[in-house]
Structure formats: structure tokens, C-alpha cells
Image (cartoon, rainbow, N blue to C red):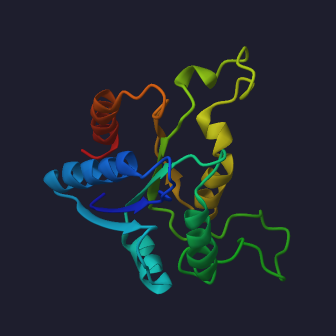
């Protein structure tokens, strides 16, 4: 892998300016650039061109999506990005539709992805504490993990043929932050996949 495309999917809210997500993007950029990777970044707060975004996805060997978890999902501006950019890529730049055709309607759904040599990583920031996940005794998530919550996002990238890297998560970032340790864990996480 040489080319890394980072999407900063943070949406600014009065209670969350996006400093942590921006810092994680900058840490990833500096860390990977130092290792010799080519890095491009798109930020939801900036204007972007749909065709250029498709080119970035085709260029990338790895995609990192850095985002806060908003209402158990992606921020609305990233959902908008997906609706425009990913829909525009359905004609062959990201996938050949769902992989089926009228001639072969029984081919398995979701097999049309063309980015089969591309990896992706979700990097998430949560208000929820770590112990609320993966524990059947926890009332809210009922034993489910972070990747269970983000299964639809994993399916989106699988639809393009992409392969997952382990999800990185910062927990409890508003009520009990441990930012310096999160930064150290993030760099170690990146080092597992970007040598």
C-alpha cells in the first residue's frame, strides 16, 4: 500500500467542534507521510467535486474514514457524501451495480465491487464508554460490539469489493476523555497495517 485517502467525516455541532477528529486526521497524515505514504484528505466541511472524489477512491490503496458517531451512525454530511459520490460510482468506478444483470439475475447480490485491492478502516469517536460494548449485562447495546453497530457501513465498503482493517475507536471522549492515550493507541493501530 502506498496511497492513503482519509475522509474527515466530522459534522460541527455546538457541543462538538471536531477538534479530536481533526487531530486524528492530522496524526494519521503526519504518521503515514513520515513512513513514505502518499496521503490525500477530504473534509466534509469543505467543498468537494464528486468526480474527483471517485478518482481519490480509485487512487487509494487504503481508505480511512475518521468520524464521530452521531445518533448511532454517520454524521449527516457524510451520508450526503455517500449518497452523491457512491451513487455516482455505481456505473463502474466503484462497482458494477450490485453485480447482477438481467441476463444473470441469480448471481449473488453485492458482488459488483471493483475496488478489490483496496483496504478500508473506520476510525470512530464515541461519547459511549468502552464497557458499554460487548457486554450482555449492559442495557443499551445488549452485548453488541462497535462493528455490529457499524455493520451497514462495512456492507457499503464490501459492496465496492474493499477489504476491512480493524476498526479503531476512541471511547468516552466527552465525559471521560483520555486523548493522549488515544493518540498513542491510534499510532500503534496504524503501525499494524501501514509498515
Report the number of numbered marks: 0
Q: Is 145 drawn above or below residue 137 in the view shown?
A: below
Taking the spot 62% from the left edge, 54% from the top edge, the residue there is 153
Query: Which quadrant of the view contains residue 2?
Result: bottom left
Point out the image quarter for the C terminus: top left
Point out the image quarter for the N terminus: bottom left
Q: Is 86 drawn above or below residue 67 in the view shown?
A: below
User: 190 and 169: which one is in front?
Assistant: 169
- For the question of whether residue 82 can be seen, the reply is yes
Q: Residue 172 appears at what percent x and percent y?
A: 49, 29
Taking the spot 27% from the left edge, 63% from the top edge, the residue there is 39
Q: Residue 187 appears at what percent x and percent y?
A: 28, 38
User: 160 and 126: which one is in front?
Assistant: 126
12 lies left or right of 102: left
Taking the spot 69% from the left edge, 76% from the top edge, the residue there is 97
Residue, far top: 137
User: 69 and 175: which one is in front?
Assistant: 175
Q: Is 144 drawn above or below residue 148 in the view shown?
A: above
Q: Is 189 drawn above or below residue 35 in the view shown?
A: above
Residue, far front: 14
Q: Residue 115 appears at what percent x and percent y?
A: 50, 67
Q: Residue 136 appears at what percent x and percent y?
A: 73, 17
97 lies left or right of 106: left
- For the question of whether residue 95 can be seen, the reply is no
124 lies left or right of 102: left
User: 129 and 13: which one is in front?
Assistant: 13
Taking the spot 27% from the left edge, 53% from the top edge, the residue there is 26
Amino acid at each position: 500500500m502506498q496511497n492513503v485517502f482519509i475522509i474527515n467525516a466530522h459534522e460541527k455541532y455546538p457541543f462538538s467542534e471536531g477538534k479530536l477528529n481533526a487531530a486524528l486526521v492530522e496524526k494519521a497524515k503526519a504518521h503515514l507521510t513520515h513512513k513514505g505514504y502518499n496521503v490525500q484528505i477530504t473534509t466534509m466541511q469543505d467543498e468537494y467535486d464528486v468526480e474527483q472524489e471517485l478518482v481519490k477512491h480509485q487512487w487509494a490503496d487504503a481508505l480511512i474514514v475518521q468520524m464521530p458517531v452521531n445518533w448511532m451512525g454517520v454524521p449527516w454530511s457524510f451520508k450526503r457524501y455517500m449518497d452523491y459520490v457512491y451513487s455516482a460510482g455505481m456505473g463502474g468506478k466503484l462497482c458494477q451495480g450490485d453485480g447482477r444483470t438481467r441476463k444473470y439475475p441469480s448471481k449473488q447480490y453485492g458482488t459488483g465491487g471493483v475496488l478489490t485491492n483496496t483496504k478500508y478502516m473506520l476510525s470512530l469517536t464515541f461519547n459511549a464508554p468502552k464497557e458499554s460494548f460487548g457486554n450482555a449485562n449492559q442495557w443499551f447495546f445488549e452485548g453488541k460490539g462497535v462493528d455490529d453497530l457499524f455493520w451497514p457501513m462495512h456492507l457499503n465498503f464490501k459492496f465496492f469489493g474493499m477489504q476491512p482493517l480493524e476498526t479503531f475507536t476512541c471511547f468516552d471522549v466527552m465525559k471521560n476523555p483520555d486523548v493522549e492515550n488515544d493518540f498513542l493507541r491510534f499510532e500503534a493501530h496504524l503501525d499494524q497495517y501501514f509498515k
